[in-house]
Image (spheres, helix red, strand yellow):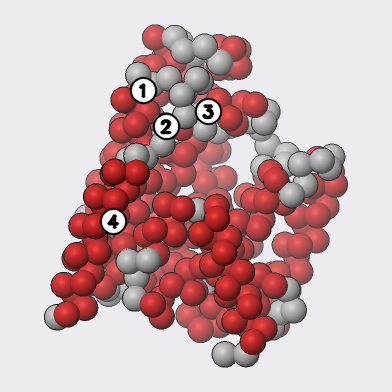
Amino acid sequence: MSDLLQQSYTECKRLNALHGKTYYLATLLLPAKKRPPVHALYGFARFADEIVDDLASTLSDQEKADALHIWGESVLADLRKGESNDLIGRALVDTVKTYSIPLEYFEAFMRSMEMDLTVTRYKNYQELMTYVYGSAVVIGLEMLPILGFSDPRAIEAATALGTAFQLANFIRDIDEDIERGRIYMPLDEFARFGVSEEMLLARKLTPEIIEAIKFQIARVRELQAKAEAGIQYLDPISRPCIRAASELYCGIVDEIEANGYDVFTKRATTSTWRRLRVAGIAFIQTLFLRMR
């Protein structure tokens, strides 16, 4: 590996460790050779997020859209030609080539990132899933060749788990997203429980909002259970990592329940104790598999 490529992988790892602590913890359960490509996928996704939410926070929406489009087109062009001079792009291109990851997944991701700058409401679940496919599902699909799998049913499981992860985050971040001018909840489903958009924007917990959140949490758990049935199709050495990630990410909804469904004044977080417990169990399982 060249020095420049090593620098790229190192930067992706830094982004992962800095911004995705739960995700990073889960990757430590993978064999060492599988970690760098997973970091590369995270680095690409995180840098796009930073353009949308962080690095360009002082720019207008149009300036953000232009910056995201220019960067995204540059990375996609690099993926097509199989080489890159971009700090993040080098590791990404190398990973995509090594594992033959379809380019269409990255195109879908960039479309969803661009939606973040133009779409602020989702009328129904189907509309929301268009965004979720590109923002979360494709990341799981990109990881499958790295994790290794023995049956096409693993694809269905990865789709379900990616959706569950994203929905759990959406529920937790309702207040934060409203602050940014967005609502990542199906408005028609909330309306069934008597929740209007105006009620959400008021950011005051009501019995109606609690019932609507309970409905969304039930969906997260249903998707998680569906994904769990498909984890068996992954390479054995990758299973503890994904099971740990599933419990930690989807476990956010447990914390929301513990907070009395108050997503407006209490941000649900997975406790350090739970992270250590889940990681410890997964580490022992991984160690046992490696010994075998």
Residue 124 visible to an observer of this rendering: no
Please name the amino acid that badge 1 sits on.
Answer: Asn
Q: In this rendering, would 233 be left or right of 38?
A: left
Residue 168 visible to an observer of this rendering: yes
Residue shown at 38%/46% (left/top)? 249
CA separation in Å, label 2 and label 3: 11 Å
Mark 3 or mark 1, which is nearer the start of the sequence?
A: 3
Whether tag 2 and tag 1 are in contact, CB under 8 A, the answer is yes
Locate the N terminus and report the quarter of the image it occupies: bottom right
Mark 1 or mark 2, which is nearer the start of the sequence?
A: 1
Residue shown at 54%/78% (left/top)? 95
The residue wearing badge 1 is: 259
The residue wearing badge 4 is: 279
Mark 3 or mark 2, which is nearer the start of the sequence?
A: 3
User: For the residue carrying disc 3, how many other residues have a C-alpha within 10 Å: few (<14), some (14-19), or many (20+)?
Assistant: many
Locate the C terminus and report the quarter of the image it occupies: bottom left
Q: Secondary structure at mark 2?
A: loop
Please name the amino acid that badge 2 sits on.
Answer: Ala
User: For the residue carrying disc 1, how many other residues have a C-alpha within 10 Å: few (<14), some (14-19), or many (20+)?
Assistant: some
CA separation in Å, label 1 and label 3: 14 Å
Please name the amino acid that badge 4 sits on.
Answer: Ala
Whether tag 1 and tag 3 are in contact, CB under 8 A, the answer is no
CA separation in Å, label 4 and label 3: 28 Å
Mark 3 or mark 4, which is nearer the start of the sequence?
A: 3
Q: Hey, which residue is sitting farthest bottom in the picture?
A: 1
Q: Secondary structure at mark 1?
A: loop
